Amino acid sequence: MKPAGPVIGVLALQGDVPEHLRALQDVGARAVSVRRPEELHQLDGLVIPGGESTTLWRLSVAFDMLEPLRKLIASGLPAFGSCAGMIMLADRLADGVTGQLTFGGIDMTVRRNAFGRQVDSFESDITLSGLGIDGTGPLRAVFIRAPWVEQNGEHVAVLGTEERTGRIVAVRQGQLLATAFHPELTPDRRIHELFVDIVKDNT
């Protein structure tokens, strides 16, 4: 008997894979690790975890995942990217390395490592707005070599900004969701709950 809840994969090439799996399970999803193209057909949604975006790009090429994921995301597969995952969902990069490719899908320009290097990691309270996640207090956000959104298209909803800088750090475009911070590293499950709701609405 198939467990209740949508099947959501976590791209298991690099990054906080166990933490995302646990967070998704906490909010009622059937969470699975994926790293091969043949594993993608089972998914109702996909999480792209943090890590290092150039490494994610190169590993996705090495594991033959880049083009299949680009096609699936373009065709409507719900996806959520945190930190490096936000970079991978961006249509444009402000400072990508030569030849760097992304999965794309969100009409935004993202700057890599915009908040600084590893030693500049910090935590900040983020006020979330819109789409059913407001009115429940600020979210404590963990930023680790985090990107920010420098430009977003008219169909990209801004869900949150970082207080000190005013920079955009959480966005949604249709069935795609992205955060510059790591919601999997705190007990607050609102971002994962929102993504599961997006996946359910898409199935």
Image (spheres, rainbow, N blue to C red):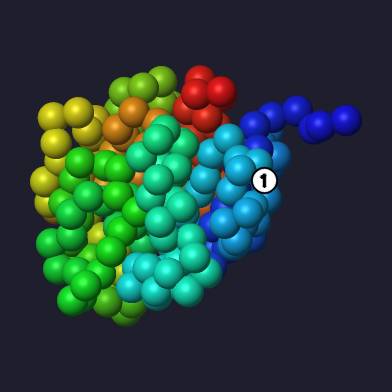
Total number of numbered labels? 1
Residue visible at 54% across and 39% down in the picture: 45
Quadrant location of the C terminus in the rendered image: top right
Which residue matches tag 1?
31
Q: Decide which of 164, 13 is in the foreground and name it.
A: 13
Quick check: can you spot residue 154? Answer: yes
Q: Quadrant of residue 6?
A: top right
In the image, residue 140 above or below residue 16: above
Q: Amino acid at mark 1?
A: Ala
In the image, residue 48 above or below residue 59: above
Specify whether 199 is left or right of 39: left
**Mark 1 crowd level (few <14, some 14–19, many ≥20, 10 Å Cα):** many
Residue visible at 22% across and 33% down in the picture: 156
Quick check: can you spot residue 163? Answer: no
Residue 149 pos. (x, y %): 19, 50
Residue visible at 61% across and 43% down in the picture: 41
Q: Secondary structure at mark 1?
A: strand
Residue 92 pos. (x, y %): 18, 54
Residue 137 pos. (x, y %): 40, 31
